[in-house]
Amino acid sequence: MNIVIKNQNYRILDSLNTEIIKTLTGEFDASELQNQLVNLYYNKAVIDITAIKNYYDINSVIAFLRVFDPTKVVLLLNDSEVINSGSFLGRLVENGIYNFTRNAAGITYLLDNPNSYENVTQYTKSDYVNKNIHIPVREQEEDDNDDFPAAQIKEEKIKAISGQKIIGLQNLTEHAGSTTLAYMMIKQLRLNYKVKGIEMNKQDFIYFRDPDLALCTSIDDFKLKLKEFKDIEVIIVDLNEFDTLDHCDEILYLVDPGIIKVNKLMKKDQNVVSRTKNGKVVLNRSAIKQEDIPDFEYETKFNVFFSVPNINDRKDRVQIIDAFLYNLGFNKQNPGSVGLFGNIRKKD
């Protein structure tokens, strides 16, 4: 008898012809799942990867799967480029997860014919990783006695060109618009600069269908991507709460200034104001007039760097975004008419 844990891929799992003792539906982390499986005996666990919280982060997936005996796991992947990348699959194999597929037929086969390491060893090889996600070959450690001779990243200064600037965007209030703002910044910066974008942990960037946008699922992937972008002048990073702050020259903390969202933020994190001291607070999708920003600052104690109103992200160029970039120090951007400077805060 098997257990099934399903979420977005429920149609595939509902079509299985196998004996099921228990089905769980939704999104779970490891602690939530352990409570559900106490004293439950089963043969195999068929797990929809989208049922794992933060499943685009390979570390979250591995932590979740440690609840199970890896020989009993059959992991159902989705069609995401991130999930099917060589680096992601390689990490699964390195952690003992050998049975993964994208369809019902694959699940049925693996339940009866589980893979051994020899069946999936190709996913751990650097040439496979590079072939699938187009990253430079990781350097091999010279010491043959190293416990981790493959896939080691030598510590070195990540920045490759003088003056390269890495800017991270992080939502403070829920759904404050970091992904769209990052895309607009990239779209307009590339008129004057060499620029690339990186999204951490999620894959919303793919919907923009822009070759200058990349996806990363771990800090190692991020470091490798920075090496790949060694000749790029500006890198915009949609952080999605991922811990890459130490690698950014500038952090933009986005706040939707609506009453409910701000009050939720303050209740959730009483130290949020002090946490933003190392970056710049940007009001995004803001309906607050420039003359009312001092009142907002007084009420919230935030020091607002810039206020971005609702914009049309379908336009090729939006003047207020150029003004925003100009105020961030990108002097090649033309902020347009003098009237727009009413939205610009003085530079630090």
Image (cartoon, helix red, strand yellow):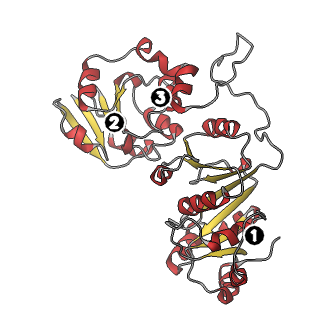
Most foreground residue, 189 or 79? 189
Residue 318: give x, y in percent of width and height.
59, 71
The residue that mark 3 highlights is 89
Residue 179: give x, y in percent of width and height.
54, 59
Query: Residue shown at 60%/53% (left/top)?
Result: 239
Q: CA distance from mark 1 to mark 2?
A: 48 Å
**Mark 2 and mark 1 in contact (Cβ < 8 Å)?**
no
- For badge 2, the amino acid type reads Ile
Tell me the quarter of the picture where residue 30 sits: top left
Q: Secondary structure at mark 1?
A: helix
Q: Is 302 placed left or right of 215 in the picture?
A: right
Q: Earlier in the sequence, mark 2 or mark 3?
A: 2
The residue that mark 2 highlights is 47
Disc nearest the viewer among 2 and 3: 3
Residue 309: give x, y in percent of width and height.
58, 77
Q: Earlier in the sequence, mark 1 or mark 3?
A: 3
Disc nearest the viewer among 1 and 2: 1
Q: Is 246 placed left or right of 203 in the picture?
A: right
Q: Is residue 141 above or below residue 208?
A: above
Query: Residue shown at 28%/26% (left/top)?
Result: 106
The residue that mark 1 highlights is 327
